[in-house]
Image: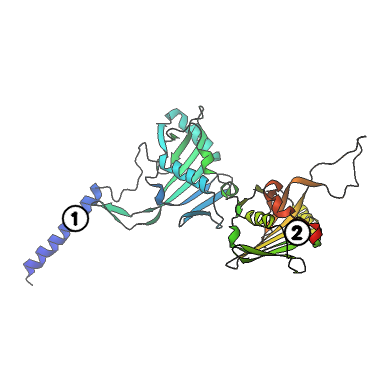
Amino acid sequence: MKKKTKIILVCSLVAAIALVAFIMYKANVFNSKAEFSQTMFASADSSLVKKVFIADMNGHTVLLQRHGGEWRLGDSTMATPELVRSMLSTLMNLRVDRPVPSKQIPNLTRVMAASAIKVEVYEDAPKFTLFGHDFGVKERHVRTIYFGPETPDHMGNYAILEGMEEKPCVVTLPGFRGIITPRFSPYAQDWMSHQLFSTKPTRIQELRIIDHLEPANSFSVRKVDDRHYNLLNAQGEIFPRYDTAKVFNLLAEFRDKKFETIATSLDQEKIDHIFADNLFKTVTFTDINGTTTTMRCYFMDEDYDYYDDQGDKLTDIEHLFNQDRFYAVIGDDTKTIYVLQYFGFGRMVQTTLAQLVGEENR
């Protein structure tokens, strides 16, 4: 190849590279600095959001991640779908109402340094876009928002977008009257799904309920086919007759069960007492796939004392237990102590063998 031809090729290549670089520069491909706009806090498409990290200035943190069609906390606990949808809708619809006046910025900055809620948003995003095509799409950190206190009229919140620290704003949601920060709680418990378990009755292969106070009332229900079940006593003996409606109603209780809250204020001495002295039922069910779930139920001690008509404290009452709520643990996880209501779980933990078969058939 002649020397002149080589020079022409090299010059053409350099010119082409320079042209592409100029086009990318003019298109702000390499400019990651945020630009002020009414929608600068918002996500264009909530379906692209894959992860949201929330933290406050006191060390409380929450990591929410998308797993297929579900959202889970960092420890894989299911997040409440309604709360996640509200958060994603908020991220997509955040709008700048107005910039904060310059004279208010120093004081606002001091307040936010002590009390802001930090929200990091991760989306499937391209490295750059050129000629309408995205290149290098993967999960990326796209923005960090610092939410401050609500405005005096309670119609929005002060907020700062990372990269635009010099321009704090008031952010609002169109059509929403109220403050925004409750939708970004840094407490994991606020996001947890209260679904304890959800199983269709026809998927239960076997149900076993152990009564620790009256063992003779322990029983099992075993699936024969979709329409028939065997009822057995604690010794494994099958009852030829029982109330089928009551058995079916009992199995239906497992369709949708939610806990009220998680006990977080119990000290270790109290926990040891509950586990040692208050166990009253163990409920175990196995589904048709062989997956077994066990729930151990413990009485909740009553928080107040009883007195007679003369005002003397009664000390001879054997069990002063809460009549509305009880504690429960699932499987081997004794660190998570659920608070359940008898109103929702009463049939499950209070049904006796005598009620299913009748005293005359026992």
Q: CA distance from mark 1 to mark 2?
A: 88 Å
Identify the residue shown where x is 84% and y is 49%.
319
Residue located 77% across and 69% down the image: 235
* Relative image position of residue 105 (x, y in whole percent): 46, 32
Asked if residue 335 shows in the view, the reply is no
What amino acid is at disc 2? Val
Q: Which mark is residue 18?
A: 1
Of tags 1 and 2, the one toward the viewer is: 2
**Residue in the foreground of this view, choosing between 79 and 325:** 325
Task: Please say if 250 is above or below 166.
Answer: below
Residue that appears at 48% across and 34% down: 157
Quarter placement of the N terminus:
bottom left
- Along the viewing direction, whichever of 313 and 40 lies nearer the viewer: 313
Q: Is residue 248 above or below residue 205?
A: above
Residue 321 visible from this viewpoint: yes
Q: In this figure, which residue is indicated by the disc labeled 2?
A: 357
Hey, which quadrant is residue 4 in on the image? Answer: bottom left
Dot 1: what SS? helix
In the picture, measured across the screen, residue 127 lies left or right of residue 84, that is left
Q: Toward the viewer: 361 or 223?
A: 361
Q: In this orientation, which residue lies closer to the viewer: 193 or 51? A: 193
